[in-house]
Image: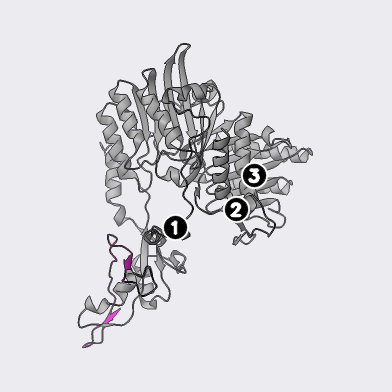
């Protein structure tokens, strides 16, 4: 707020903080100090008189506006999906404001002016403690300070994945393979699966879904190479993946140039499933191989996100995958699926049936338990079903990395539900679902992994897929992951009945994952497993 000293008029003015500049300015450190920084906004704030010569600075407030980032496609006649997304991304900076954040002690006049300017309510105004944008701290977090950083760790080659590329398909034929990233190398498993298929003379077709890819994606290059070699290549690219629209458009065009079949999914639905299919000509005839994962085909996030994936040539699962690709790439009606849980067709109903089955087991006096590890919980229908399970006495553990709209421990409603978040070195991104199905043996229950959270948008407005995990050795791996998360007292935050979170504290006598935390324990476990192999 600046004042004209001659007229006394006070005028609100805006100074936009450049995003191209570092958010922290390095200063010459003093004696005994290695690093010294001042924030860019404080530098501007304390030198604002240079921007408005002759004016008095009455006060200043730091704020940011947040706009609706969803890409809404128009219906211009003759416009392609790619053209519509390009136009929508261009218009994003003019989208309606949905929220304003203020730093401490904002000017009341400025606050009122912004509320009126953007037609907001007080519910749309936030006064968060601390920084408005924590992403600027990546600059500080990348400083060369080994004592403050996690010990170095490089993902290990999966034990079941042979080093020789030619043996990848042999290994999958020998039995399903489960991989756990970033503990096991994404490059030596998922990347190599597609690269090998692209260069394999016996490969007939490669089909993939793409939700988010990086600028340096090896997958697009492998698909381009396969298409140039005459293989059938089909790629379902989701152009509405928020903030990745332009990158996905670029790779879609590159694939189209070499004759790959590029489609943009089903009208009205986002394609969020993580699915790859390879069809090979073998001595016994055509055989399909599939990868079904919980994470994106993105090489950088694969080192930071915790995800699981299944490689299989099970003819029923790969047959379901073929049908799903027919639905995504052609004009086929919604197909039937024998094993895969597919949204929006069957997934919600199957999860509801599994929850109701646990209730029936509990009522009959048999073991009943539900464990779900996911990113968000919000779907009202499933939340009500979980409340019913809790009221019936079913023990429910939810390991939810992000927000959860279901409060645990509410008397009469959710006493048997526990909700925790695992926060640490890696971002917990995997979706794993376990249902005891009347057995006290964890390996006898039903397990699923997939791309969907328990959110309305995932179950009703997106194409998602989850696969059952049937082989005992793979179930044992999934139970191991869930059990470690449930014993973690180092990185766990427990939701209370009022919706707040309390950080766990390991007791003095704690051992194993209870003491070291999920991520450190799984790193050590993966190293021990690799040495034993």
| Residue 351 visible in image | yes
Neighbour class for label 1 at 10 Å: few (<14), some, many (≥20)? few
Image position, residue 244 (x, y; %): 35, 45
- The answer to whether residue 211 is above or below residue 500 is above
Q: Is residue 395 left or right of residue 380?
A: right
Residue 307 in magenta?
no
What residue is drawn where x is 67% and y is 55%? 510
Q: Residue 483 carries which label?
A: 3
Image position, residue 477 (x, y; %): 60, 37
**Picture quarter containing residue 135?**
bottom left
- The answer to whether residue 533 is above or below residue 94 is above
Nearer to us in this view, 369 or 119? 369
For the C terminus, the quadrant is top right
Nearer to us in this view, 156 or 218? 156
Image position, residue 25 (x, y; %): 31, 67
Residue position for label 1: 146
Residue position for label 2: 516
User: What residue range appears in magenta?
Assistant: 1-28
**Picture quarter containing residue 369?**
top right
């Amino acid at each position: 707020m600046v004042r004209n000293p001659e007229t006394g008029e006070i005028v609100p003015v805006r100074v936009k903080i450049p995003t191209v500049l570092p958010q922290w300015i390095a200063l010459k450190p003093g004696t005994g100090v290695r690093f010294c920084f001042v924030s860019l906004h404080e530098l501007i704030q304390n030198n604002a008189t240079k921007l408005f010569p002759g004016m008095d600075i009455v006060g200043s407030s730091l704020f940011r506006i947040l706009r609706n980032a969803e890409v809404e496609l128009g219906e211009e006649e003759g416009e392609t999906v790619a053209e519509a997304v390009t136009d929508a991304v261009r218009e994003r900076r003019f989208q309606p404001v949905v929220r304003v954040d203020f730093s401490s002690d904002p000017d009341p006049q400025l606050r009122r002016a912004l509320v009126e300017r953007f037609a907001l309510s007080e519910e749309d105004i936030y006064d968060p403690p601390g920084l408005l944008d924590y992403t600027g701290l990546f600059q500080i977090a990348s400083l060369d300070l080994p004592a403050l950083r996690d010990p170095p760790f490089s993902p290990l080659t999966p034990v079941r994945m042979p080093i020789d590329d030619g043996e990848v398909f042999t290994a999958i034929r020998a039995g399903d393979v489960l991989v756990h990233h970033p503990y096991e190398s994404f490059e030596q498993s998922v990347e190599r699966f597609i690269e090998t298929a692209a260069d394999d003379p016996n490969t007939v077709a490669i089909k993939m879904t793409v939700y988010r890819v990086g600028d340096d994606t090896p997958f697009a290059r492998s698909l381009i190479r396969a298409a140039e070699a005459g293989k059938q290549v089909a790629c379902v690219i989701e152009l509405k993946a928020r903030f990745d629209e332009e990158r996905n458009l670029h790779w879609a065009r590159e694939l189209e140039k070499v004759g790959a079949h590029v489609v943009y999914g089903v009208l009205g639905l986002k394609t969020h499933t993580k699915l790859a299919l390879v069809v090979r000509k073998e001595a016994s005839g055509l055989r399909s191989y599939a990868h079904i994962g919980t994470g994106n085909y993105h090489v950088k996030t694969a080192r930071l996100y915790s995800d699981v994936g299944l490689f299989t040539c099970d003819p029923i699962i790969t047959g379901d995958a073929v049908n799903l690709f027919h639905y995504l790439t052609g004009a086929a009606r919604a197909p039937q699926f024998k094993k895969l849980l597919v949204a929006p067709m069957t997934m919600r109903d199957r999860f509801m049936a599994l929850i109701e089955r646990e209730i029936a087991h509990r009522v009959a006096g048999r073991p009943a338990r539900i464990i779900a590890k996911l990113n968000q919980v919000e779907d009202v229908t499933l939340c009500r079903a979980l409340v019913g399970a809790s009221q019936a006495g079913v023990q429910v553990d939810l390991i939810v990395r992000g927000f959860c709209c279901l409060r645990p421990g509410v008397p009469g409603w959710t006493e048997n539900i526990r909700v925790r978040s695992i926060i640490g070195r890696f971002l917990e991104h995997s979706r794993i679902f376990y249902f005891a199905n009347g057995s006290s043996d964890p390996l006898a229950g039903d397990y699923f992994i997939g791309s969907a959270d328990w959110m309305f948008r995932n179950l009703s407005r997106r194409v998602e897929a989850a696969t059952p995990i049937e082989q005992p050795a793979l179930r044992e791996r999934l139970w191991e992951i869930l059990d470690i998360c449930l014993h973690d007292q180092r990185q766990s935050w427990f939701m209370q009945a009022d919706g707040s979170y309390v950080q766990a504290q390991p007791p003095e006598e704690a051992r194993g994952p209870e003491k070291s935390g999920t991520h450190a324990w799984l790193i050590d476990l993966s190293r021990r497993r690799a040495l034993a192999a």
